[in-house]
């Protein structure tokens, strides 16, 4: 803590190195300097008081103000790699800097100038050493500028930067030295554009947090202007250099100018409700005025400039790995592999990891460089025949037991500890009941009967088993049934709407006991509903394996489209847009949320461009095909923000009941539920940290109600960002500190732990396609189906023909490997940039240290649990440990790590 206070300038009297000697004598004469011990003002917000002593103030009043010199140190982050044009422009800027085309600073006081009644500010100053340091190759370069100030200047609160160079630069931070209060810090982390692109100066505020009503008089106009600039006017096409945050509907997923196959419905609005996304303002397409024209790969899509990936992230993902996969590798795979080529055996799938996949093309050097990052490929080279060999890393699901995926135990374990552990529910009614409108979809009575499962219940009736919390269900019937006619008419796509019943064994594991497969109506050679139960012979064994594969395909679609994309990517974007538009960088809540918003707008834009767009990766790789995003939109109709927090979600699914006597206020129905057990530890730590932070600034409910920026943020997130659900009565109120704590905890949970649990296991579990096929190509034949004889003759061949083809599988594997990768600049929960200067409130820095310590303790507890032989869903022979909620990770595909934000 001493180090923190020293950095904050809250302990000791330093000799200010740039004050004139006569001022220094006066300052040191007075031992009651106000800045030595900052006074806790209203709600105990630490505010640095004054730069000069009372004696000096009297001296100044009697005489004229004394001029002293302060120094600004700007930390600029260099690019690691510059193209030829950037190098030339950099040299030109170094030259013109010497003749007046330079970087200009003005420092603003927190006080008003009594003469002009305007904010008090310094004279303009320039960076004096730009040209001398232009050739430095270090990652960060410090530039300095001397500021001449009057002794009655007050405390620095803001600084403006005017960049007269041709090239933008990334400003990491500014430190002002020379004030008696000690250094004043300005966290920036922003691109400063040339006046050629944006003529107005950029403003940056010090790290001192202020609620709107506590804004010092000298900063009020700057605070308001900065927010107006960030909101923009909602007009025009956005330039890549802009910093404007605004809303739009999802009207850019299709490309009607390419033909009917690329038309997709508009998402967002009364017809198809959906969250809003960041507005780009592009012109409409030629053939549909309501559809926004597309920017196709590899050209970048607009997001506000500061939301774009930093260079290391770009190299790892945006301009590097993903683009290499999408633009180079996937086309080469299409050229090399027949679309209808099936795997000939399981050994051929395994050979992708041991031997590799031959590609019939000459690979370019730049592709080799872009794919050199670990884990996507461990070997990619040109052979003497002019081809290449793509070798995948072995997915974690095969690392301990390559046959585990076949076992019912593993099928049930992954419902609790796999990549999608959030759809398992307590079975409350048997047979299950559909909520679909019978006037549209007909009577949807379940085919499940008590006799299907009674033999697996240890002598209990179904009613008894439900009362004793022994039966659970994963129900995708209502999600898929409305779309099945469309899906099954697609070439090479076949799906059921599935229900799976699980029995909780005495050892705490789940055993699947019945799978219901439903179709809207009977297709030739098939029944509209059938129930498949665990096998009793060879034929039923293969039928059972096919049924489980269809369940996994349903699960993969719901996981990707509803739980992962909708709930952690799309639903969070409105809260982020509104935060930038309505919360000043000085606002304490913005400072709290800032690390949890990093990169999300950029990754969502890349998804619209490459992944969820018409004929994009998601449509190509998942069973619903062109109907993927419509399924996502259908899920949004049932999305509720008030149930997105972990405890509420567990209770909603019947996986827990309220119990004040328990540590987290609830009792799990399945004690060994790794996702829930580990998640509750992280939820509790986030909640405690947020409550401490909120209490600091809002000790009284009236402060929450009267905070106009805070109320505007929340109201706009709902009324504009989630406009289609704005009239729902379940939105939480924002009237007290407890309300605010609950809302912020939910947002931070979704952006960090929930996203991590759903994202970083995609390749470790799905990289072996038979374990988790993203699509299926054949229904299960019965005795009346012409394909039934071929199924009997060679069931393994039939099973493999029902899975994705070799081309579909290898494309999917390449993409989910990339999506499961931690980049080198990942920032994990409990970490944050500029750890000791992100806020000027030293007590909150200390509280954050406590949060970080708790996260480290949680990591050790998770490691302990993964060694506990009594927890059979995470420990045992061939059992994968559950590490998706282990907070820390190395770069690459690790199947662990909780980043602060939705960053991939």
Image (spheres, grey):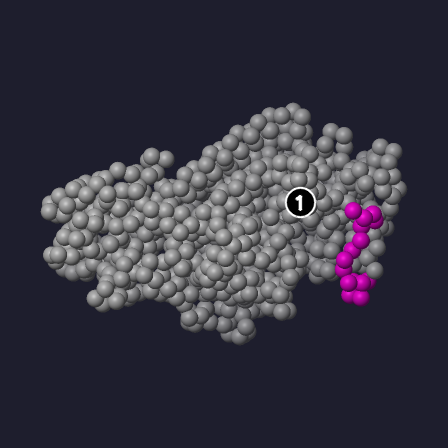
Instruction: Check disc 1: other Cα within 10 Å, few if <14, some if 14-19, many if 20+.
Output: many
| 363 left or right, relative to 154 | right
- Split into 4 quadrants, where in the image is the N terminus? top left
Q: Is residue 430 magenta?
A: yes
User: Is 543 in front, or is 762?
Assistant: 762
Q: Residue at x 69, y 34 (%)?
A: 671
Describe the element under mark 1 as helix, strand or loop.
helix
User: Is 629 in front, or is 279?
Assistant: 279
Q: Image height check: is 649 above or below 483?
A: above
Residue 126's x, y, as percent? 19, 56
Q: Which residue is mark 1?
A: 650
Q: Which residues are magenta?
A: 428-442
Residue 93 shows in the view: no
Q: Main secondary structure of the magenta part?
A: loop
Q: Is residue 433 magenta?
A: yes
Q: Image height check: is 21 above or below 278?
A: above
User: Is 261 in front, or is 75?
Assistant: 75
Q: Residue at x 61, y 31 (%)?
A: 880
| 194 left or right, relative to 244 | left
- Quadrant in which residue 773 is drawn: top right
Q: Residue at x 40, y 59 (%)?
A: 213
Residue 730's x, y, as percent? 64, 58
Residue 433's x, y, as percent? 80, 53
Residue 662 shows in the view: yes
- Quadrant in which residue 396 is drawn: top right
Q: Residue at x 11, y 56 (%)?
A: 63
- Quadrant in which residue 660 is drawn: top right
Residue 275's x, y, as percent? 57, 61
């Amino acid at each position: 803590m001493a180090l923190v206070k020293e950095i904050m300038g809250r302990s000791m009297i330093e000799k200010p190195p740039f004050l004139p000697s006569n001022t220094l004598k006066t300052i040191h004469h007075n031992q009651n300097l106000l800045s030595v011990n900052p006074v806790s003002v209203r709600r105990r917000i630490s505010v640095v008081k004054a730069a000069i002593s009372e004696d000096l103030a009297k001296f100044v009043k009697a005489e004229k103000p004394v001029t002293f010199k302060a120094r600004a140190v700007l930390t600029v982050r260099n690019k690691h790699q510059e193209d030829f044009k950037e190098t030339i422009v950099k040299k030109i800027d170094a030259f013109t800097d010497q003749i007046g085309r330079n970087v200009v600073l003005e420092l603003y006081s927190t006080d008003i100038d009594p003469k002009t009644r305007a904010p008090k500010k310094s004279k303009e100053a320039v960076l004096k050493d730009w040209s001398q340091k232009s050739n430095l190759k270090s990652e960060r370069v410090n530039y300095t500028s001397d500021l001449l100030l009057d002794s009655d200047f007050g405390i620095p609160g803001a600084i403006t930067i005017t960049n007269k160079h041709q090239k933008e630069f990334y400003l990491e931070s500014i430190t002002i030295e020379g004030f008696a209060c000690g250094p004043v810090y300005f966290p920036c982390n922003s691109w400063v554009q040339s006046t050629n692109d944006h003529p107005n100066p950029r403003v940056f505020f010090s790290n001192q947090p202020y609620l709107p009503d506590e804004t010092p008089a000298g900063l009020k106009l700057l605070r308001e202007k900065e927010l107006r600039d960030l909101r923009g006017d909602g007009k025009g096409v956005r330039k890549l250099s802009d910093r404007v945050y605004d809303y739009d509907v999802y009207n850019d997923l299709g490309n009607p100018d390419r033909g009917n196959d690329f038309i997709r419905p508009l998402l967002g609005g009364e017809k198809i409700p959906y969250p809003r996304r960041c507005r780009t303002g592009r012109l409409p397409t030629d053939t549909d005025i309501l559809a926004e024209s597309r920017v196709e790969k590899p050209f970048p899509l607009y997001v506000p400039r500061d939301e774009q990936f930093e260079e290391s992230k770009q190299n790892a993902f945006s301009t590097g790995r993903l683009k290499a996969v999408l633009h180079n590798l996937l086309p080469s795979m299409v050229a090399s592999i027949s679309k209808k080529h099936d795997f000939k055996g399981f050994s051929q799938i395994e050979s992708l990891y041991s031997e590799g996949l031959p590609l019939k093309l000459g690979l370019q050097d730049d592709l080799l460089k872009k794919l050199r990052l670990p884990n996507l490929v461990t070997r990619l080279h040109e052979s003497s025949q002019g081809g290449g060999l793509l070798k995948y890393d072995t997915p974690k699901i095969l690392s301990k037991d390559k046959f585990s995926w076949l076992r019912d135990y593993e099928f049930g374990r992954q419902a609790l500890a796999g990549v999608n552990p959030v759809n398992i529910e307590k079975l409350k009614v048997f047979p299950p009941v559909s909520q679909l409108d019978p006037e549209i979809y007909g009577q949807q009575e379940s085919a499940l009967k008590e006799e299907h499962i009674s033999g697996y219940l240890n002598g209990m009736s179904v009613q008894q088993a439900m009362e004793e919390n022994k039966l659970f269900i994963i129900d995708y019937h209502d999600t898929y049934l409305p779309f099945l006619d469309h899906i099954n008419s697609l070439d090479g796509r076949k799906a059921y709407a599935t229900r799976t019943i699980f029995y909780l064994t005495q050892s705490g594991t789940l055993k699947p006991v019945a799978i219901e497969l439903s179709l809207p109506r009977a297709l030739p050679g098939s029944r509209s509903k059938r129930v498949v139960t665990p096998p009793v012979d060879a034929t039923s064994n293969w039928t059972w394996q096919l049924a489980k594969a269809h369940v996994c395909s349903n699960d993969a679609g719901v996981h990707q489209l509803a739980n992962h994309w909708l709930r952690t990517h799309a639903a969070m974007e409105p809260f982020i847009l509104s935060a930038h538009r309505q919360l000043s960088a000085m606002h304490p809540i913005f400072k709290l949320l800032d690390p949890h918003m990093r990169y999300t707008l950029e990754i969502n834009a890349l998804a619209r461009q490459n992944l969820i767009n018409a004929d994009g990766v998601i449509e190509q790789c998942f069973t619903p095909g062109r109907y993927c995003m419509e399924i996502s939109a259908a899920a949004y109709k049932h999305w509720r923000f008030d149930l997105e927090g972990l405890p509420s979600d567990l209770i909603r699914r019947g996986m827990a009941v309220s119990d004040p006597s328990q540590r987290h206020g609830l009792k799990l129905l399945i004690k060994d539920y790794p996702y829930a057990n580990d998640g509750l530890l992280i939820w509790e730590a986030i909640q405690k940290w947020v409550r401490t932070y909120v209490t600091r600034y809002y000790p009284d409910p009236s402060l929450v109600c009267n905070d106009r920026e805070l109320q505007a943020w929340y109201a706009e997130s709902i009324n504009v960002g989630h406009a289609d659900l704005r009239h729902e009565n379940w939105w939480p109120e924002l009237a007290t500190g407890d309300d605010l704590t609950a809302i912020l905890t939910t947002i931070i949970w979704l952006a960090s732990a929930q996203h991590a649990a759903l994202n970083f296991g995609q390749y470790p579990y799905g990289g072996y396609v038979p374990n988790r096929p993203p699509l299926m190509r054949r229904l299960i034949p019965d005795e009346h189906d012409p394909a039934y004889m071929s199924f009997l003759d060679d069931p393994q061949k039939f099973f493999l023909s029902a899975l994705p083809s070799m081309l579909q599988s290898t494309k999917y594997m390449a993409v989910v490997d990339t999506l499961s990768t931690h980049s080198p600049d990942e920032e994990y929960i409990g970490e944050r940039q500029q750890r000791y200067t992100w806020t000027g409130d030293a007590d909150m820095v200390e509280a954050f240290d406590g949060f970080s310590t708790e996260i480290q303790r949680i990591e050790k507890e998770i490691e302990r649990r993964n060694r506990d032989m009594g927890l059979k869903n995470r420990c045992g022979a061939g059992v994968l440990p559950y590490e998706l909620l282990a907070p820390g990770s190395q770069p690459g595909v690790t199947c662990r790590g909780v980043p602060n934000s939705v960053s991939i």
